[in-house]
Amino acid sequence: MKHYHFGEISSTNDYIGHLLQIEDEVVVTAEFQTKGRGRNEKNWFGEYKSNLYYSYGKKHHKEVNYEELVSYQFIGCLAVLKLLMSIAPNVAFRLKYPNDVYAKCPNGWKKISGVLVEHSFSGERCENSVIGIGINVNQREFPISEGINPTSLSLLGIETEPEKLIEPLSNNIKKYLNYPSNKIFEEWSNKLNVFDKIIIVSNKSGLWIAKKLYPNGQLELQSIDTGELTIVDNSNSIRYELD
């Protein structure tokens, strides 16, 4: 698997799409992204050479079913979680629905990583899948962002460099890609700490509670006030406490 590294790039997810025209499987990393982004096209800012800016891309030579495509998001989250637990075994990490990883800090849970999965289609056939990952490594100051309270490995007392995370992260992704989709979903759902939590949905009034998690990544919520059921997914923003 080839690895391309850049000093500065618009976004690793964007560039990897070009490489997948000539490569079957590739990793792209950068020291800085000028147009880094997260879910729902939110900007994702990171300092130069301080964090891991990473994308894994795979070209599909045969038809891929829906469950396999959905599992790429679960794979990205699990691969990051496994990596962080291995390099910081004394720190508690948790997945937060739908695509973030949080670390336990003295003053509460803080975001340390986000995952952005994108698929490219020709008609109904998926041609490429990309797992974009950002991990806060040595950055110690962060811009104020609504609803996000970040941390980094350095702030957690873990000293390492972004380039040291590339190979083990890629190995984790490759490992999970060999798992059946149902096993990946089972592990991802078991790692989520979303049930029995009071949930706020950005575009809905009132308070909600999680009732069911579906293999396609959707989460069924029930209104505490009215009993109404609703479905949320990657396109929704929800807030809840991990503890």
Image: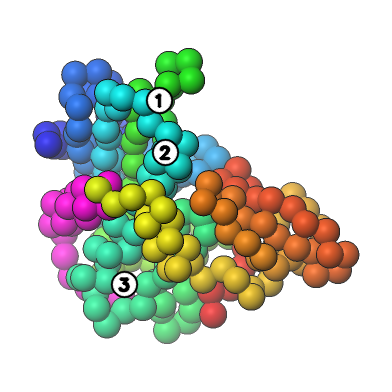
Q: In this view, does 104 lie above or below 4?
A: below
Secondary element at tag 3: loop
The magenta span reads 156-177
At horizontal 37% and vertical 26% (from top left) the residue drawn is: 63
Q: Is residue 32 visible?
A: no
Q: Where is residue 21 in the image (x, y as percent from the top left)?
A: 25, 18
Mark 2 belongs to which amino acid?
A: Leu
Q: Mark 1, residues whose alpha carbon is within 10 Å: few (<14), some, or many (≥20)?
A: some
Q: Mark 1 points at which residue?
A: 126
Q: Position of residue 99 (x, y in %)?
A: 46, 54
The answer to whether the residues at label 2 and label 1 have Cβ atoms under 8 Å apart is: yes
Secondary element at tag 1: strand
Mark count: 3
Q: How far apart are marks 1 and 3 (CA)?
A: 40 Å
Mark 3 belongs to which amino acid?
A: Leu
* 43 displayed left or right of 213: left
Tell me the number on the disc at residue 155.
3
At horizontal 80% and vertical 69% (from top left) the residue drawn is: 224
Q: Earlier in the sequence, mark 2 or mark 1?
A: 2
Q: Which of marks 1 and 3 is nearer the N terminus?
A: 1
Q: Mark 2, residues whose alpha carbon is within 10 Å: few (<14), some, or many (≥20)?
A: some
Mark 1 belongs to which amino acid?
A: Cys
Q: How far apart are marks 2 and 1 (CA)?
A: 9 Å
Q: Does the magenta stretch include residue 77?
A: no
Tell me the number on the disc at residue 209.
none
Tell me the number on the disc at residue 69.
2
Q: Which of 234 and 188 is in front in this view?
A: 188
